[in-house]
Image (cartoon, grey):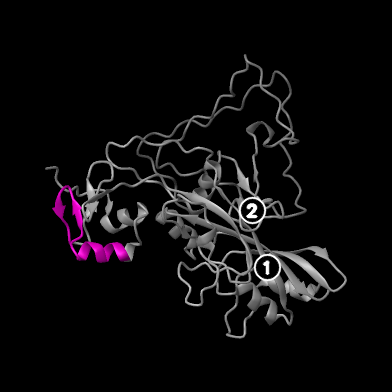
Protein backbone atom coordinates (compact mmCIF):
# COMPACT_ATOMS: atom_id res chain seq x y z
CA UNK A 1 0.00 0.00 0.00
CA UNK A 2 1.45 3.35 -1.03
CA UNK A 3 1.93 5.79 1.86
CA UNK A 4 0.04 9.04 2.08
CA UNK A 5 2.27 11.80 0.72
CA UNK A 6 3.43 14.69 2.90
CA UNK A 7 3.65 17.03 -0.11
CA UNK A 8 0.89 18.06 -2.47
CA UNK A 9 -2.38 19.85 -1.72
CA UNK A 10 -4.92 19.67 1.09
CA UNK A 11 -7.47 16.93 0.75
CA UNK A 12 -10.51 19.24 0.89
CA UNK A 13 -8.94 21.41 -1.81
CA UNK A 14 -8.45 18.32 -3.96
CA UNK A 15 -12.13 17.38 -3.61
CA UNK A 16 -13.17 20.91 -4.53
CA UNK A 17 -10.77 21.10 -7.48
CA UNK A 18 -12.11 17.80 -8.81
CA UNK A 19 -15.54 19.42 -9.04
CA UNK A 20 -17.09 17.08 -6.48
CA UNK A 21 -18.13 19.63 -3.86
CA UNK A 22 -17.10 22.83 -2.14
CA UNK A 23 -14.21 22.93 0.31
CA UNK A 24 -16.55 23.28 3.29
CA UNK A 25 -18.63 20.30 2.22
CA UNK A 26 -15.41 18.42 1.56
CA UNK A 27 -14.31 19.05 5.14
CA UNK A 28 -17.62 17.62 6.36
CA UNK A 29 -17.08 14.50 4.22
CA UNK A 30 -13.60 14.03 5.63
CA UNK A 31 -14.74 14.47 9.24
CA UNK A 32 -17.54 11.93 8.64
CA UNK A 33 -15.02 9.30 7.50
CA UNK A 34 -16.36 9.08 3.94
CA UNK A 35 -12.98 9.77 2.28
CA UNK A 36 -10.13 7.28 1.86
CA UNK A 37 -6.58 7.87 0.59
CA UNK A 38 -4.73 4.83 -0.74
CA UNK A 39 -7.31 2.62 0.99
CA UNK A 40 -6.99 4.30 4.41
CA UNK A 41 -9.83 6.25 5.98
CA UNK A 42 -8.76 9.84 6.60
CA UNK A 43 -10.48 12.12 9.11
CA UNK A 44 -7.72 14.70 9.64
CA UNK A 45 -8.40 17.95 7.75
CA UNK A 46 -4.71 18.80 7.35
CA UNK A 47 -3.97 15.68 5.28
CA UNK A 48 -2.18 16.44 2.01
CA UNK A 49 -2.35 14.31 -1.13
CA UNK A 50 -0.50 14.18 -4.43
CA UNK A 51 -3.06 14.04 -7.27
CA UNK A 52 -0.53 12.27 -9.52
CA UNK A 53 0.20 9.39 -7.14
CA UNK A 54 -2.42 9.04 -4.39
CA UNK A 55 -5.72 7.18 -4.84
CA UNK A 56 -8.55 9.26 -3.35
CA UNK A 57 -12.08 7.86 -3.05
CA UNK A 58 -15.37 9.10 -1.59
CA UNK A 59 -17.90 6.46 -0.50
CA UNK A 60 -15.82 3.89 -2.40
CA UNK A 61 -15.84 5.78 -5.73
CA UNK A 62 -12.47 7.08 -6.95
CA UNK A 63 -12.13 10.82 -7.45
CA UNK A 64 -9.84 12.22 -10.13
CA UNK A 65 -8.78 15.80 -10.57
CA UNK A 66 -9.29 16.97 -14.15
CA UNK A 67 -7.87 19.95 -15.96
CA UNK A 68 -8.99 23.39 -14.72
CA UNK A 69 -11.89 24.98 -16.57
CA UNK A 70 -12.27 28.70 -17.38
CA UNK A 71 -15.60 29.96 -18.75
CA UNK A 72 -16.69 33.47 -19.76
CA UNK A 73 -20.40 34.31 -19.71
CA UNK A 74 -22.30 37.39 -20.85
CA UNK A 75 -24.57 37.58 -17.81
CA UNK A 76 -28.03 38.81 -18.76
CA UNK A 77 -29.99 41.26 -16.65
CA UNK A 78 -32.40 39.71 -14.15
CA UNK A 79 -30.24 36.75 -13.04
CA UNK A 80 -28.50 36.02 -9.73
CA UNK A 81 -24.97 34.67 -9.24
CA UNK A 82 -25.70 32.52 -6.17
CA UNK A 83 -25.98 28.75 -6.56
CA UNK A 84 -29.22 28.69 -4.55
CA UNK A 85 -31.82 31.44 -4.45
CA UNK A 86 -34.63 31.27 -1.86
CA UNK A 87 -36.80 33.50 -4.04
CA UNK A 88 -36.57 31.15 -7.01
CA UNK A 89 -35.09 33.71 -9.40
CA UNK A 90 -33.18 32.70 -12.54
CA UNK A 91 -29.57 31.65 -11.82
CA UNK A 92 -26.52 32.15 -14.01
CA UNK A 93 -25.51 28.52 -13.34
CA UNK A 94 -28.56 27.38 -15.32
CA UNK A 95 -27.04 29.04 -18.42
CA UNK A 96 -23.75 27.12 -18.31
CA UNK A 97 -23.07 24.45 -20.96
CA UNK A 98 -23.93 20.90 -20.01
CA UNK A 99 -21.18 18.46 -19.08
CA UNK A 100 -18.92 20.92 -17.26
CA UNK A 101 -17.39 20.02 -13.88
CA UNK A 102 -18.47 22.01 -10.88
CA UNK A 103 -17.40 25.64 -11.35
CA UNK A 104 -18.01 28.80 -9.32
CA UNK A 105 -18.14 32.48 -10.16
CA UNK A 106 -15.15 34.80 -9.82
CA UNK A 107 -16.89 37.57 -7.90
CA UNK A 108 -20.50 38.54 -8.55
CA UNK A 109 -22.64 40.95 -10.50
CA UNK A 110 -25.86 42.46 -9.17
CA UNK A 111 -29.26 41.21 -10.29
CA UNK A 112 -29.80 44.24 -12.54
CA UNK A 113 -26.20 44.34 -13.90
CA UNK A 114 -25.14 42.52 -17.03
CA UNK A 115 -21.86 41.79 -18.77
CA UNK A 116 -18.70 39.75 -18.32
CA UNK A 117 -18.76 37.05 -15.64
CA UNK A 118 -16.01 34.46 -15.13
CA UNK A 119 -16.46 30.84 -13.94
CA UNK A 120 -13.71 28.42 -12.96
CA UNK A 121 -12.76 25.53 -10.71
CA UNK A 122 -9.25 26.96 -10.29
CA UNK A 123 -9.39 28.11 -6.68
CA UNK A 124 -5.92 29.66 -6.64
CA UNK A 125 -6.57 31.97 -9.59
CA UNK A 126 -10.08 32.88 -8.43
CA UNK A 127 -8.82 33.78 -4.96
CA UNK A 128 -6.01 35.92 -6.38
CA UNK A 129 -8.37 37.76 -8.75
CA UNK A 130 -10.79 38.59 -5.92
CA UNK A 131 -8.03 39.62 -3.50
CA UNK A 132 -8.52 43.37 -2.82
CA UNK A 133 -4.75 43.80 -2.56
CA UNK A 134 -4.30 42.95 -6.26
CA UNK A 135 -6.51 45.82 -7.57
CA UNK A 136 -7.25 43.98 -10.82
CA UNK A 137 -8.95 46.57 -13.10
CA UNK A 138 -12.49 45.98 -14.33
CA UNK A 139 -14.10 48.10 -17.05
CA UNK A 140 -17.78 49.06 -17.06
CA UNK A 141 -20.08 50.89 -19.44
CA UNK A 142 -22.56 52.93 -17.40
CA UNK A 143 -25.55 54.94 -18.57
CA UNK A 144 -26.14 57.91 -16.24
CA UNK A 145 -29.22 60.08 -16.13
CA UNK A 146 -28.75 63.65 -17.35
CA UNK A 147 -26.35 65.49 -19.57
CA UNK A 148 -22.55 65.06 -19.22
CA UNK A 149 -21.33 66.52 -15.94
CA UNK A 150 -17.67 67.67 -15.62
CA UNK A 151 -18.09 67.77 -11.83
CA UNK A 152 -18.96 64.04 -11.79
CA UNK A 153 -15.95 63.23 -13.98
CA UNK A 154 -13.61 65.15 -11.68
CA UNK A 155 -14.93 63.43 -8.54
CA UNK A 156 -14.62 59.97 -10.09
CA UNK A 157 -11.04 60.65 -11.12
CA UNK A 158 -10.14 61.92 -7.65
CA UNK A 159 -12.22 59.43 -5.62
CA UNK A 160 -15.78 59.91 -4.36
CA UNK A 161 -16.64 60.44 -0.70
CA UNK A 162 -19.63 58.19 0.03
CA UNK A 163 -22.33 59.03 2.61
CA UNK A 164 -20.77 56.40 4.93
CA UNK A 165 -17.58 58.48 5.03
CA UNK A 166 -15.52 56.05 2.95
CA UNK A 167 -13.53 57.61 0.11
CA UNK A 168 -13.22 55.36 -2.93
CA UNK A 169 -10.09 54.85 -4.95
CA UNK A 170 -9.63 56.85 -8.11
CA UNK A 171 -11.92 55.47 -10.85
CA UNK A 172 -10.86 56.82 -14.28
CA UNK A 173 -13.97 57.76 -16.25
CA UNK A 174 -14.46 58.88 -19.84
CA UNK A 175 -17.48 60.07 -21.82
CA UNK A 176 -18.11 57.73 -24.78
CA UNK A 177 -21.60 58.69 -25.98
CA UNK A 178 -24.36 61.19 -25.28
CA UNK A 179 -28.06 61.35 -26.05
CA UNK A 180 -30.64 64.09 -25.64
CA UNK A 181 -31.33 63.17 -22.01
CA UNK A 182 -28.55 60.77 -20.86
CA UNK A 183 -24.84 60.04 -21.19
CA UNK A 184 -22.76 56.85 -21.52
CA UNK A 185 -19.46 56.65 -19.65
CA UNK A 186 -16.68 54.11 -19.40
CA UNK A 187 -15.38 53.55 -15.85
CA UNK A 188 -12.34 51.57 -14.64
CA UNK A 189 -12.69 50.16 -11.11
CA UNK A 190 -9.79 48.68 -9.15
CA UNK A 191 -11.82 47.73 -6.05
CA UNK A 192 -15.01 45.76 -5.60
CA UNK A 193 -17.30 47.30 -3.01
CA UNK A 194 -20.98 46.35 -2.93
CA UNK A 195 -22.89 48.29 -5.65
CA UNK A 196 -19.96 50.68 -5.81
CA UNK A 197 -20.74 52.44 -9.10
CA UNK A 198 -24.37 52.96 -8.08
CA UNK A 199 -23.29 54.50 -4.76
CA UNK A 200 -20.66 56.70 -6.39
CA UNK A 201 -23.10 58.05 -8.96
CA UNK A 202 -25.78 58.67 -6.32
CA UNK A 203 -23.22 60.54 -4.18
CA UNK A 204 -22.76 62.87 -7.17
CA UNK A 205 -26.51 63.54 -7.38
CA UNK A 206 -27.22 61.33 -10.39
CA UNK A 207 -28.77 57.91 -11.05
CA UNK A 208 -27.52 54.82 -12.91
CA UNK A 209 -29.88 53.66 -15.67
CA UNK A 210 -27.84 50.75 -17.05
CA UNK A 211 -24.56 49.03 -16.12
CA UNK A 212 -22.56 46.56 -18.22
CA UNK A 213 -19.15 45.07 -17.42
CA UNK A 214 -17.10 44.78 -20.61
CA UNK A 215 -13.63 43.72 -19.37
CA UNK A 216 -11.98 41.93 -16.46
CA UNK A 217 -8.23 42.47 -16.39
CA UNK A 218 -7.02 41.62 -19.89
CA UNK A 219 -10.16 39.62 -20.83
CA UNK A 220 -12.82 41.32 -22.98
CA UNK A 221 -16.42 40.31 -23.56
CA UNK A 222 -16.32 41.32 -27.23
CA UNK A 223 -19.50 40.64 -29.23
CA UNK A 224 -20.72 37.68 -27.14
CA UNK A 225 -24.54 37.89 -26.89
CA UNK A 226 -26.27 37.99 -23.48
CA UNK A 227 -26.83 34.54 -21.98
CA UNK A 228 -24.08 32.90 -24.06
CA UNK A 229 -20.75 31.40 -22.88
CA UNK A 230 -17.35 30.63 -24.30
CA UNK A 231 -14.12 29.09 -22.96
CA UNK A 232 -11.15 31.33 -22.21
CA UNK A 233 -8.15 30.95 -24.49
CA UNK A 234 -4.74 29.97 -23.05
CA UNK A 235 -3.55 33.50 -23.77
CA UNK A 236 -6.39 34.98 -21.72
CA UNK A 237 -5.71 32.64 -18.80
CA UNK A 238 -2.01 33.51 -18.92
CA UNK A 239 -2.91 37.22 -18.93
CA UNK A 240 -5.00 36.82 -15.77
CA UNK A 241 -2.22 34.90 -14.04
CA UNK A 242 0.24 37.60 -15.06
CA UNK A 243 -2.06 40.33 -13.70
CA UNK A 244 -2.04 38.80 -10.20
CA UNK A 245 1.54 37.53 -10.27
CA UNK A 246 0.44 33.91 -9.87
CA UNK A 247 3.32 31.44 -10.15
CA UNK A 248 2.19 27.88 -10.57
CA UNK A 249 3.81 25.23 -8.37
CA UNK A 250 4.06 21.64 -9.56
CA UNK A 251 4.24 18.26 -7.88
CA UNK A 252 7.36 16.13 -7.75
CA UNK A 253 7.71 14.08 -10.89
CA UNK A 254 5.20 16.12 -12.88
CA UNK A 255 6.40 17.65 -16.16
CA UNK A 256 6.41 21.41 -16.26
CA UNK A 257 3.69 22.67 -18.59
CA UNK A 258 4.68 25.53 -20.92
CA UNK A 259 3.07 28.93 -20.42
CA UNK A 260 1.10 29.34 -23.64
CA UNK A 261 0.59 32.92 -24.65
CA UNK A 262 2.42 34.45 -21.69
CA UNK A 263 3.26 38.13 -22.23
CA UNK A 264 6.77 38.66 -23.51
CA UNK A 265 9.28 40.97 -21.82
CA UNK A 266 8.69 44.54 -22.87
CA UNK A 267 4.89 44.20 -23.12
CA UNK A 268 2.84 46.81 -21.34
CA UNK A 269 -0.89 46.84 -20.59
CA UNK A 270 -2.75 49.97 -21.69
CA UNK A 271 -5.48 50.97 -19.22
CA UNK A 272 -7.37 53.02 -21.77
CA UNK A 273 -10.47 52.70 -23.91
CA UNK A 274 -8.68 49.97 -25.90
CA UNK A 275 -9.84 47.63 -23.09
CA UNK A 276 -6.43 46.50 -21.97
CA UNK A 277 -4.97 45.35 -25.27
CA UNK A 278 -1.31 44.41 -24.97
CA UNK A 279 1.01 46.79 -26.77
CA UNK A 280 4.19 45.00 -27.77
CA UNK A 281 7.30 47.15 -27.86
CA UNK A 282 9.93 45.48 -30.10
CA UNK A 283 13.53 45.92 -29.09
CA UNK A 284 14.44 47.44 -32.47
CA UNK A 285 12.07 50.38 -31.97
CA UNK A 286 13.20 51.27 -28.43
CA UNK A 287 14.96 54.61 -28.46
CA UNK A 288 13.99 55.30 -32.09
CA UNK A 289 14.56 58.93 -33.11
CA UNK A 290 17.31 59.54 -30.55
CA UNK A 291 20.70 60.70 -31.90
CA UNK A 292 23.43 58.13 -31.40
CA UNK A 293 27.12 58.81 -30.79
CA UNK A 294 29.38 58.05 -33.80
CA UNK A 295 30.97 54.62 -33.66
CA UNK A 296 34.71 54.48 -32.91
CA UNK A 297 37.01 53.05 -35.61
CA UNK A 298 38.04 49.44 -35.15
CA UNK A 299 41.78 50.25 -34.85
CA UNK A 300 41.41 53.07 -32.33
CA UNK A 301 42.91 52.44 -28.92
CA UNK A 302 41.52 53.75 -25.65
CA UNK A 303 43.28 56.76 -24.17
CA UNK A 304 45.77 55.86 -21.41
CA UNK A 305 44.58 56.43 -17.90
CA UNK A 306 46.50 58.26 -15.22
CA UNK A 307 48.28 55.92 -12.74
CA UNK A 308 46.23 55.18 -9.66
CA UNK A 309 47.33 56.84 -6.41
CA UNK A 310 48.39 54.55 -3.54
CA UNK A 311 45.77 53.77 -0.90
CA UNK A 312 45.72 56.23 1.99
CA UNK A 313 47.32 59.11 0.07
CA UNK A 314 45.90 62.57 0.64
CA UNK A 315 44.86 64.82 -2.22
CA UNK A 316 47.25 67.65 -3.01
CA UNK A 317 46.21 71.00 -1.52
CA UNK A 318 44.77 73.50 -3.91
CA UNK A 319 46.08 77.06 -4.22
CA UNK A 320 43.82 79.67 -2.60
CA UNK A 321 41.53 81.45 -4.99
CA UNK A 322 42.58 84.98 -5.95
CA UNK A 323 40.17 87.83 -5.26
CA UNK A 324 38.14 89.15 -8.16
CA UNK A 325 39.87 91.99 -10.03
CA UNK A 326 43.40 91.13 -8.82
CA UNK A 327 46.22 91.50 -11.35
CA UNK A 328 48.60 88.68 -12.14
CA UNK A 329 52.05 88.88 -10.52
CA UNK A 330 54.75 90.29 -12.85
CA UNK A 331 57.17 87.84 -14.28
CA UNK A 332 60.96 88.18 -13.93
CA UNK A 333 62.70 89.62 -17.05
CA UNK A 334 64.16 87.02 -19.32
CA UNK A 335 67.96 86.64 -19.15
CA UNK A 336 69.96 87.38 -22.35
CA UNK A 337 71.15 84.47 -24.39
CA UNK A 338 74.61 83.19 -23.39
CA UNK A 339 74.51 84.53 -19.80
CA UNK A 340 75.94 82.33 -17.07
CA UNK A 341 73.89 81.21 -14.08
CA UNK A 342 74.56 83.05 -10.81
CA UNK A 343 77.03 81.27 -8.52
CA UNK A 344 75.62 79.46 -5.54
CA UNK A 345 76.63 80.34 -1.96
CA UNK A 346 79.26 78.00 -0.45
CA UNK A 347 77.93 75.28 1.74
CA UNK A 348 78.29 75.79 5.52
CA UNK A 349 80.34 73.29 7.47
CA UNK A 350 78.34 70.81 9.54
CA UNK A 351 77.68 71.91 13.11
CA UNK A 352 77.81 75.68 12.45
CA UNK A 353 75.14 77.86 13.95
CA UNK A 354 73.59 80.99 12.46
CA UNK A 355 74.80 84.27 14.04
CA UNK A 356 72.62 85.77 16.76
CA UNK A 357 71.11 89.21 16.31
CA UNK A 358 72.04 92.16 18.53
The answer to if 35 sits in the magenta stretch is yes
Q: 143 or 36: which is nearer to us? A: 36
* Residue 346 visible in rendering: yes
Residue 171: give x, y in percent of width and height.
65, 67
Q: Residue at x 34, y 34 (%)?
A: 255
Please give left or right for residue 89 compared with residue 327 in the image: left
Q: Residue at x 68, y 23 (%)?
A: 295
Q: 209 or 230: which is nearer to us? A: 230
Please tell me in which quadrant of the rendered image residue 46 appears.
bottom left
Labels 1 and 2: the sequence-earlier one:
1
| The residue positioned farthest toward the right in the image shown | 180
Secondary structure beneath label 1: strand
Residue 236: give x, y in percent of width and height.
55, 46
Q: Is residue 155 above or below residue 74?
A: below
Residue 330: give x, y in percent of width and height.
74, 41
Segment colored magenta: 25-43
Q: Residue at x 19, y 47 (%)?
A: 5
| The residue positioned farthest toward the left in the image shown | 1
Q: Residues within 10 Å of mark 1 (few under 14, many from 20)?
A: many
Q: Residue at x 62, y 85 (%)?
A: 163
Pointer 2: what residue?
Answer: 221
* Disc assigned to residue 13: none
* Quadrant of the drawing holding the N terminus: top left
Please give left or right for residue 246 compared with residue 295 in the image: left
Please tell me in which quadrant of the rendered image residue 164 appears.
bottom right
* Residue 160 visible in rendering: no
Please tell me in which quadrant of the rendered image residue 138 appears.
bottom right
The answer to if 288 sits in the magenta stretch is no
Residue 114: give x, y in percent of width and height.
63, 64
Please give left or right for residue 25 compared with residue 154 in the image: left
* Disc assigned to residue 211: 1
Amino acid sequence: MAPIGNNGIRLQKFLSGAGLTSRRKGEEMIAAGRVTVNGQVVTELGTRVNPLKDNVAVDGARVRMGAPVYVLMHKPKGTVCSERDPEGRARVHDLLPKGLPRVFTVGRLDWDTEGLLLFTNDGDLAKALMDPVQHVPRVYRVKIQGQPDPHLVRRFNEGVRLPSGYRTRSAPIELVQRTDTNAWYEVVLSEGKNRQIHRMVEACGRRVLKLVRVAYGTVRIGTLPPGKCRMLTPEEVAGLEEAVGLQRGRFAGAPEAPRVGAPRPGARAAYTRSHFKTDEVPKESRGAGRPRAPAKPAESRPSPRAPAKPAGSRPSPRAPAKPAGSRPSPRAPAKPAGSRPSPRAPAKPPGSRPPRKG
